[in-house]
Amino acid sequence: MYKLEITSRAKKQLKHVTKNYEQIAINNVFIEIKEDPFVGKPLSRELTGKFSYKVGAHRIIYKINKQDKIVQILSAGRRSTIYQ
């Protein structure tokens, strides 16, 4: 199992997730990513090396450190704004 680290940027973005069911869904995704971080979609272009996991209208962007077994959550938010 991988360790999960959430950046300060992602923490700030997650505060804007106000609906209880969305918070529960995102927390469940964090558990899934810790168990198998490669479940997300590998990204390309300027986001090469990062992964995206879709949770309804939200996306979680993260990178994996295989050597230290750490998943770092870089950002989380609505798809319309997350890739900007």
Image (tube, rainbow, N blue to C red):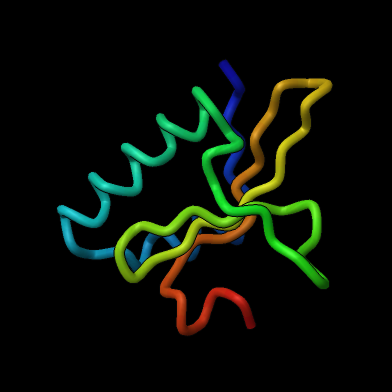
Q: Nearer the viewer, residue 16 or 73?
A: 73
Q: Is residue 4 left or right of residue 22?
A: right
Q: Nearer the viewer, residue 11 or 80?
A: 80
Residue 54 percent coordinates (x, y): 42, 58
Q: Is residue 73 above or below residue 81?
A: above
Which residue appears at 34% of the width and 40% of the height?
27
Q: Quadrant of the N terminus?
A: top right
- The total number of labels drawn is 0
Residue 14 percent coordinates (x, y): 42, 59
- Where residue 67 sits, quadrant-wise, is top right
Q: Is residue 58 left or right of residue 53?
A: left
> Going by the picture, which residue comes out furthest to the top?
1
Which residue appears at 49% of the width and 53% of the height?
53
Residue 20 percent coordinates (x, y): 16, 54
Residue 61 percent coordinates (x, y): 59, 57
Which residue appears at 79% of the width and 21% of the height?
68
Q: Is residue 21 above or below residue 72?
A: below
Q: Quadrant of the C terminus?
A: bottom right
